[in-house]
Amino acid sequence: MTNQNNPKYTGVIPPVLTPRTAEGTIDTVGLDAIVEHLINGGVSGLFVLGSSGEVPYLTTAERDAVLSQIVAINAGRVPVLVGACEQTTARVIDEGARLIGLGADALVVTTPFYAISNGPEIEAHFTAIHDALKVDIFAYDVPVRTHHKLPVDVAVRLAESGAIVGVKDSSGDDVSFRQLLLATKHVPGFSVFTGHEVVVDGALLGGAHGVVPGLGNVDPAGYRRLFDLAQQGEWAQAAAEQDRLARVFDIVHTPDSSRVSPGAAGLGAFKTALVELGVIASNTMSAPMVSLNEAEAAQIREILAETGLLAVAAK
Amino acid sequence: MTNQNNPKYTGVIPPVLTPRTAEGTIDTVGLDAIVEHLINGGVSGLFVLGSSGEVPYLTTAERDAVLSQIVAINAGRVPVLVGACEQTTARVIDEGARLIGLGADALVVTTPFYAISNGPEIEAHFTAIHDALKVDIFAYDVPVRTHHKLPVDVAVRLAESGAIVGVKDSSGDDVSFRQLLLATKHVPGFSVFTGHEVVVDGALLGGAHGVVPGLGNVDPAGYRRLFDLAQQGEWAQAAAEQDRLARVFDIVHTPDSSRVSPGAAGLGAFKTALVELGVIASNTMSAPMVSLNEAEAAQIREILAETGLLAVAAK
Amino acid sequence: MTNQNNPKYTGVIPPVLTPRTAEGTIDTVGLDAIVEHLINGGVSGLFVLGSSGEVPYLTTAERDAVLSQIVAINAGRVPVLVGACEQTTARVIDEGARLIGLGADALVVTTPFYAISNGPEIEAHFTAIHDALKVDIFAYDVPVRTHHKLPVDVAVRLAESGAIVGVKDSSGDDVSFRQLLLATKHVPGFSVFTGHEVVVDGALLGGAHGVVPGLGNVDPAGYRRLFDLAQQGEWAQAAAEQDRLARVFDIVHTPDSSRVSPGAAGLGAFKTALVELGVIASNTMSAPMVSLNEAEAAQIREILAETGLLAVAAK
Amino acid sequence: MTNQNNPKYTGVIPPVLTPRTAEGTIDTVGLDAIVEHLINGGVSGLFVLGSSGEVPYLTTAERDAVLSQIVAINAGRVPVLVGACEQTTARVIDEGARLIGLGADALVVTTPFYAISNGPEIEAHFTAIHDALKVDIFAYDVPVRTHHKLPVDVAVRLAESGAIVGVKDSSGDDVSFRQLLLATKHVPGFSVFTGHEVVVDGALLGGAHGVVPGLGNVDPAGYRRLFDLAQQGEWAQAAAEQDRLARVFDIVHTPDSSRVSPGAAGLGAFKTALVELGVIASNTMSAPMVSLNEAEAAQIREILAETGLLAVAAK
């Protein structure tokens, strides 16, 4: 609740979606619009090339184009964190060096994936990347994708050594999240962010410094309100705002699971919501993911209307 | 936070440990002492024959003896819930009928295990058990043991039909927990309890009605304080109490994992703490689980002293 | 291939299905018919109360009735192995003592389930059961149900100590299966059986002593032919017979997975095939499992006809 | 056993290890030596940049250097297959185009990883890659790394459409392997290879066309003998050779698991064996993996001596 350790990063730092035109190319106009939508909503940073930004589906050229575009439109207003999404240490260093060269302020790095590692390798991985690049690094704990949980003891040692400045926790393990908060509250400047959308109130009550919500693309102002209420100790109101956001989050359950993959469902719902809100023009997904259809969009409109984000649900 | 739906069960209902003598028989004196320790600590119910009560290790005769003993010593002071820990529907009905006959007030029932089921079978399972026994049933969602998550939509339908009066959620999935809270808050009398020890403040903030903490055997008064603070809206103090309890919970990390199984570590730590607190005489585990040794007990004493539960750590 | 260690158990020992009448009671007439069908097919033993026998769904009274019936009809013609399907050591001992008392020749015992154990506990588990009951014990390795793989080193030590006389491997881990074969071939009388249906030829080539095929209820003579061909070193013909049986096994893929659970699909297909073959009268499953419908039965008839088990597919 | 469908690829195609000097750079002299060792051993192809080649740890520059070196030293003697190890479709196409440009004859492609996909996306993934590159593509089924099993029905459709010319199965699921063999034996030119080391005899008996054994780096001649014996129908001798190779494979169990990760253990053992056999000069692993130490090397020498690969174990 109180940031006794003076964390460098706090607040709402959403993982920025990567819009595509109906033809499938990067939608640069839409990218600018999303950035303005987010900054107007009160975010304190932008996380570019995250899972929600479809980073595993983007070619290297597309990754560079997206980052450059956002760095330019942001123009230094908020910090830009960027995902260096590569399999292991040496490849992350190459990827990270290139992305930092394009203007990012900090890197977001996962545990190794495809590789089959262990705790000591994970610790060496982050240490080597920080030694090579000397930039702020957030450890991104997302075992549903990497299949290696970032162990709490490793995270604490990396925090204490300065190899990482924070953790973005998308592990879904709220017990280890609390343990990480308790074990790092003495580390000056260190930040722990939750990557979840629907238990942010509890995370903040437990001492989290911020949130990286994919749903923050749809309702950045809602997450900013939730964060501010928590900072003010207005917990009952924070919980009520969280409940409203949890209802907005139901848009991710609208896609037909026989047609849309688990990876495409949530991101497709976020993109479709941004189309309905008039922020972007198309909900096209990166191939081979399929886009949501009109029936799914209609359900999303209902939810956006019910939660106050759309004036009327009918189109 | 507020119990708008007037739940029948609320507060702290710990899963009662089953003490054994050094010779391995059920320690009936210790069982009485634990019950008094819990009721003195302010619990609102007793959950007998849960995982923390080592139910899978108890013979049928032992299960009956433990329940009968607790029903007698409790003498109606608080409701007694009992686990009917069996593989599938017909076996749960047999087990439940016998346990209700011994004086339990309500049953705690998991999804089928060893069997490989699906959503419709899980729904039919709970419905058939309630139809057969006509008693209060808590669904116990513990996929780490049953390997079947209770689906939220199934739980909601069972709540609405009256087949279950509550859910004890030990799933570790805080997102589905919040969704369950939101989806059942309109069901009169229905309760959602968290089975976790270290994020109870957040669960209560999100609307949970109570907690079933294994650690509540060690510090029932601490969990009662946390619950009361939450009821009073004193969230910052609730979080501080939770942080203290999270530190107490570190006792579960003291056992040597090369020697003690994951199943025995936490329960062994709880039993050892009760020995150190003078509640019971032996930390003996059900075979084939091994008991904690003196080195592990020494670490536990340190933690109990540091968190105010023991006057001095030295023995 | 050659049984240099003179194993006590060899050949085809199918897990006997438990037929139910359309009303859901145990079908004793059908049970007798299945036993005759199996013995006529050339099986070398009967495994009663296995997963294929729906053991987790049977009440204790039903388990006893099924075993007693089979012991009586078998009348000592082949060994009767029986599953003591209980959660942990003390409960298995109680269950096993009762079942041995009803006339079984040997017990089939899994690693603990619902409990969360480790290697040493698993070793102590089997040792304690053998010490208590002094009967032949097969370790049944079925991690898809117990969620604990029987470690190869533990199995080898249990074989060497005499605590177990064999392993039924349904782990799906063909590498550890081969390692187990190599590591136990020096143990006099020890048997390693595969629990799989479609790679029995390779298992026998690698030195397996027998097979426990659920599909053996449908085509016991086919598995006996496969076993005999392997014994004679006629490997090409054995592989061809296996290929035919693999096609028969496709009956397990006929159920609609939106309606029938994974646990019910295979067993339901086996029961339906026995109805089509005229061995039993009803394909009724234990509640809450659903039975296969006529559309699914029609597909099964096609496969039985195509593989030579039914004269004509049309009904 | 018999290749009725006239497969384009057959025999032993090992995943070529990538040796590093003690300083950690690519050991080009060692790379040449491994290629000669393999071709002298009778392999029918080289699989470069596979998991055993440490592909996830190699930078793009290193990947290119390794492939170019092997293409040059091979000089067209056997086909060169190369792994295009990237997260999703568009990235695989970029990677594959570059690698084919360097002289590879065919690509080896996994299901998407890091991404969370489903069956239709996996099918679209392979189809799009083949449409873009028009080269021979092997689907590499390795769920322990990608966490998505290649579904049998998807593989069959891809085989029939010509999008893939074969499957390298490292899934550890021998049942689906047999089903794939049966379901594709009508597809002209199609190949199914097993990626396992210790059940190759059974796989070949079931109709597999070849093997991609990491252990083939250590004993290529042994795998060639096994393959030839199977082709000749000398199954008992094939099984005996497989048993010897299974004993050689025990070198992967020598590393201390508290020090060496699961990913590093097997590859480190293969490299160490090649040092002991005099093929390469150093067993250095790609960072952050640790290399095997002298104690582990000593155990490996024992096994190599016992299995006839080293004249004497003492060093």
Image (spheres, coloured by chain):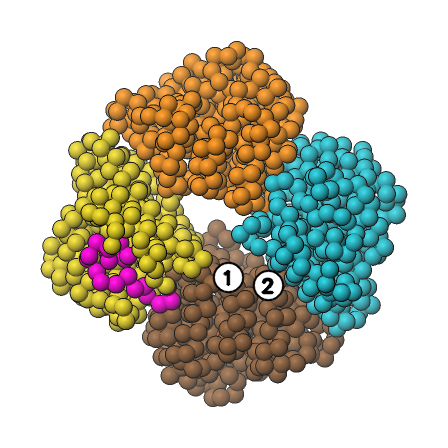
Chain colours: A cyan, B brown, C yellow, D orange
In percent of the image, x 44 and y 41: which residue is there?
D153
In percent of the image, x 80 and y 33: which residue is there?
A101
Could you say whether the residue bearing mark 2 is in a helix, strand or loop? helix
The range drawn in magenta is: C271-289
Q: Badges 1 and 2: C-beta atoms under 8 Å apart?
A: yes
Q: Is residue C275 magenta?
A: yes
Q: CA distance from mark 1 to mark 2?
A: 10 Å
Q: In the image, D191: left or right of A311? A: left
Residue A305 is situated, as x and y percent measured from the top left of the image, at 73, 65
Residue C97 vertical placement versus C225 (above, below): below
Q: Mark 1 = which residue? A: B149
Task: Rate crowding at label 1 as few (under 14), some (14 to 19) or many (20 or more) other CA atoms within 10 Å.
Answer: many
In percent of the image, x 58 and y 46: which residue is there?
D116
Could you say whether the residue bearing mark 1 is in a helix, strand or loop? loop
Residue B34 vertical placement versus C54 (above, below): below
Residue type beneath disc 2: Ser
Residue type beneath disc 1: Lys
Give the letter of the chain under mark 2: B
Q: Mark 2 = which residue? A: B176
Residue B295 is situated, as x and y percent measured from the top left of the image, at 53, 58
Task: Residue B77: tell me if it is visible.
Answer: yes
